[in-house]
Amino acid sequence: MTELYILLAILVAFILFSVYKYFKQKKVLTTLTEEEFRQGYRKAQLIDVREPKEFDGGHILGARNIPLTQLKQRLTELRKDQPVYLYCQSGARSGRAGLVLHKKGYHKLYHLQGGYKKWTGKIKITKKLDY
């Protein structure tokens, strides 16, 4: 019976942590529709936080690839005085990237609702993906 209580406590803690992260992300990161994103990304730092293979398979024209896995090591490539527009495949990684950047002192943070898979604008393909 105690195992059940322990399992239940872990589940409740996980749910509470997830809810906290969700609301924290909403507070520090502005989610933009594709139309809103298009209006501002040319005057901002446009960052694709997907892995290089995904980036090479197609990315928004003008984007720089700084994968979420490398973001903390590559912060010097981003300016704090300019807006940062983030996107990934669906929106989850760009949300986590926004939390990382906010913790490091970045405040003008935006991300694309639905991510790259919902993007209908101009793209650039560097390499064909093999999957």
Image: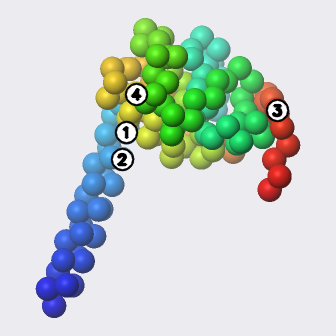
Q: Nearer the viewer, residue 20 or 69?
A: 69
Q: What's the residue type where badge 3 is placed? A: Thr
Considering every residue shown, the one lying at the far left of the view is 2
CA separation in Å, label 1 and label 4: 11 Å
Residue at numbered disc 1: 25
Find numbered disc 3 in the image and state the secondary structure of the residue it sits on. loop
Sooner in the amino-acid sequence: mark 3 or mark 2: 2
Q: What's the residue type where badge 4 is placed? A: Leu
Residue 119 in view: no
Asked whether, in this view, residue 96 is left or right of residue 114, the answer is left
Which quarter of the picture shows residue 108?
A: top left
Q: At 51% from the left edge and 34% from the top edge, which residue is drawn?
A: 70
Residue at numbered disc 3: 126
Find numbered disc 4 in the image and state the secondary structure of the residue it sits on. helix
Considering every residue shown, the one lying at the far bottom of the view is 1
Q: What's the residue type where badge 2 is placed? A: Tyr
Select label 3 or label 1 by which is in front: 3
Residue at numbered disc 2: 22
